[in-house]
Image (cartoon, rainbow, N blue to C red):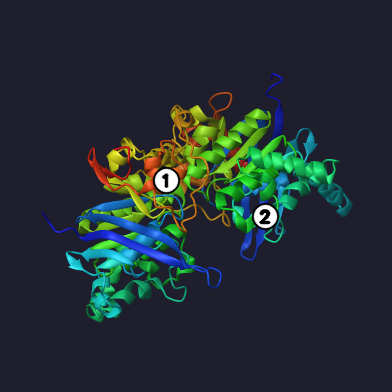
């Protein structure tokens, strides 16, 4: 691997459970992916597919009833996963480390610009807070930097704007302020959770080109969570498709769009209307996403899949690798290994009983 | 020529904004001087950024808001000045589908009660017949018969939107305003609802106004597209023309901003990125509302709002044509 594309974040076999009144929800199950430096990766999935939860797990910002039950999250050589921590002091030390990483090494942009900013604090304070915490600099220097950041994200009159409150900004401007705050300490990784979902297309175009310019300009990486395939097609180098808490397909943008393997990805691609096309029924995926309270032994997508076979209901498919980046978990591509996979899963079930 | 189902002429709607005491009264011009007509079985898609007045337009046509000027004709009948009571029989034929399927259904009603309620309000059909119709409607929108006794909270967003559609169809309307019918739904579910609305239209020849900011979805469902900017209709015409060769500079920017779900497309290269935001709709200047963000803006644009002119098969409001 060349020096430019160094491994930055590596998630391996990550699982996250939520304890609820109805039982345990297995929101994320055994996902693995990797981001190298200078890459933009898109995680695509419908609501409830676990895309946001896995990112919150990386940042260690999960809700109290959630727990990382297994797997590792390595960021630049440091272990971020809380799965192995048992004692209170260990957890405390881990949280301390996370506080240094959040904001400084990993910047995060949240979905809703309306709720993320504190309504009673001036945005100048909210922008300089992170800079002051992570860098030893004076108030004036932090302010200086905040002004420059606001200019970079295209907000006019930044000196005056710093003294204003969030309500004085429009949605698109608030989102840009959040991006400015996330980039305040030159993070090596920017995680953006649906950064443009709440915005109009014209503002979306502004924000996307801003993210691209900043990421490429600072030679950092970005992880973009979205359900909009158009956004990932334009901005990302690689795509990870999630469904029902699992990764079903991954690959470079061209591989996903031109050599689609998984039936779910095909369904997603078919369900977006093409501008040029005349009015004819859209391809759609019947049914609704699975209930993660009761995860069956088989493929999570099988109840909605038009190519489902008998084996899909019973056993989990294994990952089939097509190229260096492209792989897919579907029985259509691992039939030849069916015998051994079924036996392995039978043994696993026996062991659990 | 057949009478259009809905005809709107120079429609205006403004809202008073609270100002300081003794200050001159301020207004938001949500809809200004909008004219169009919709034929039977046709769909008009209204697109534009948030705050451009597209939802207000839909609501004003249904007289949920009282218009401040202009005329609304429903099948040739001038309904602009109709009172609440005069509107009542007409409301049966003019319905609405709402954006948020979580907020627009009464949580204490079962699905069956909810779909039956509009028919009860209008004293339509005998009790037995109503029950049959409920079953029929549920089938039309793709709900299972055993869902009839369930409550809204037991359904997913897409199914709730189906309940809303069934309720709307209960009165056999001729005209439906769909206000952001897909925006609360996932991509794969959106496609289901779009197909359903198209199927119903083909069967019953209903006319739709679809208000949405998702340009792809609107393109798919609409025959005609109207583009709104700060309350003004800046371009209106057949969907393939408006999307294929947009003429108004705002439409061009809007269409080019749609991310193409195709990695090989030129995408961002040809994109016209609008600088700045939509100006405040309070006290819009007298000229073209888009002139503050338009790259072709001249002194002529700032003087007065250009009229909608017929250009190449559609209507555009821009001085350049």
Occupied quadrant, residue A2: top right
Q: Chain of mark 1?
A: B
- Percent x, y of residue A242: 55, 42
Mark 2: secondary structure: loop
Disc number for residue A164: 2
Q: Is residue A44 above or below residue A292?
A: above
Question: What residue would you read off at disc 1?
Answer: B290
Q: Is residue B86 above or below residue A343?
A: below
- Percent x, y of residue A126: 73, 51
Instruction: Between residue B308 and residue A214, name the one nearer to us.
Output: B308
Q: Is residue A49 visible?
A: no
Q: Is residue B212 visible?
A: yes
Occupied quadrant, residue A42: top right
Q: CA distance from mark 2 to mark 1?
A: 27 Å
Position of the N terminus of chain A, as image quadrant, is: top right
Disc number for residue B255: none
Look at the numbered discs 2 and 1 and tell me whether their residues touch, using CB distance below 8 Å: no
Residue projecting furthest to the top: A2
- Percent x, y of residue B80: 26, 69
């Amino acid at each position: 691997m060349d020096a430019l594309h160094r491994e930055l974040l590596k998630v391996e076999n990550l699982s996250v459970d939520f304890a609820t009144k109805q039982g345990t929800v297995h929101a994320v199950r055994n996902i693995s992916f990797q981001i190298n430096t200078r890459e933009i990766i898109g995680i695509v999935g419908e609501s409830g597919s676990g895309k946001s939860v896995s990112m919150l797990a990386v940042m260690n910002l999960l809700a109290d009833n959630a727990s990382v039950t297994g797997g590792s999250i390595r960021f630049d050589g440091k272990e971020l996963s809380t799965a192995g921590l048992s004692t209170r002091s260990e957890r405390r030390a881990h949280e301390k480390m996370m506080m240094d990483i959040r904001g400084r090494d990993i910047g995060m942009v949240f979905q809703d610009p309306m709720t993320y900013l504190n309504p009673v604090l001036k945005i100048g304070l909210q922008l300089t807070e992170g800079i002051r915490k992570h860098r030893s600099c004076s108030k004036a220097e932090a302010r200086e930097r905040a002004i420059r950041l606001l200019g970079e994200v295209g907000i006019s009159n930044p000196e005056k704007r710093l003294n204003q409150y969030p309500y004085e900004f429009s949605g698109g401007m608030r989102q840009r302020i959040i991006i400015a705050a996330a980039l305040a300490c030159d993070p090596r990784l920017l995680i953006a959770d649906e950064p443009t979902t709440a915005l109009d297309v014209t503002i979306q175009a502004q924000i996307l080109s801003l993210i691209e310019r900043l990421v490429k300009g600072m030679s950092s990486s970005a992880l973009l969570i979205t359900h909009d395939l158009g956004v990932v097609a334009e901005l990302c180098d690689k795509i990870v498709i999630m469904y029902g808490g699992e990764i079903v397909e991954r690959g470079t943008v061209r591989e996903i769009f031109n050599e689609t393997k998984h039936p779910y990805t095909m369904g997603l691609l078919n369900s977006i209307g093409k501008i040029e096309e005349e009015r004819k029924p859209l391809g759609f995926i019947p049914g609704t996403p699975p209930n993660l309270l009761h995860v069956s032994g088989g493929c999570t997508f099988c109840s909605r899949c038009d190519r489902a076979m008998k084996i899909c209901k019973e056993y989990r498919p294994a990952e089939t690798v097509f190229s260096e980046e492209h792989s897919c978990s579907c029985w259509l591509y691992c039939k030849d290994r069916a015998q051994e996979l079924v036996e392995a899963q039978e043994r696993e079930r026996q062991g659990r009983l | 020529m057949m009478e259009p189902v809905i005809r709107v002429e120079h429609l205006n709607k403004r809202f008073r904004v609270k100002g300081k005491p003794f200050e001159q009264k301020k207004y938001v011009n949500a809809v200004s001087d909008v004219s169009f007509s919709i034929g039977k079985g046709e769909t008009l898609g209204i697109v534009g950024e948030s705050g451009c007045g597209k939802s207000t337009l839909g609501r004003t046509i249904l007289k949920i808001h009282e218009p401040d000027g202009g005329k609304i004709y429903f099948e040739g009948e001038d309904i602009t000045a109709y009172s609440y009571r005069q509107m009542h029989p007409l409301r049966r034929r003019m319905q609405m589908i709402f954006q948020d399927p979580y907020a627009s259904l009464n949580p204490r009603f079962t699905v069956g009660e909810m779909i039956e309620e509009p028919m009860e309000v209008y004293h339509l059909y005998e009790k037995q017949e109503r029950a049959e119709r409920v079953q029929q409607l549920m089938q039309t929108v793709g709900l299972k018969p055993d869902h009839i006794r369930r409550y809204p909270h037991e359904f997913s967003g897409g199914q709730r939107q189906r309940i809303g559609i069934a309720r709307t169809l209960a009165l056999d309307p001729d005209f439906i305003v769909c206000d952001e019918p897909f925006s609360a739904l996932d991509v794969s579910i959106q496609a289901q609802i779009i197909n359903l609305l198209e199927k119903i239209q083909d069967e019953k020849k209903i006319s739709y106004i679809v208000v949405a900011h998702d340009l792809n979805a609107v393109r798919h469902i609409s025959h005609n597209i109207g583009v709104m900017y700060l309350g003004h209709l800046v371009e209106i015409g057949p969907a393939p023309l408006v999307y294929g060769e947009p003429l108004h500079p705002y439409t061009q920017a809007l269409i080019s901003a749609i991310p193409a779900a195709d990695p090989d497309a030129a995408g961002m290269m040809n994109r016209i990125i609008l600088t700045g935001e939509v100006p405040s709709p309070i006290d819009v200047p007298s000229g073209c509302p888009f002139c503050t963000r338009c790259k072709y803006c001249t002194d002529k644009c700032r003087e007065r709002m250009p009229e909608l002119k017929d250009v190449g098969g559609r209507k555009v409001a821009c001085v350049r044509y």
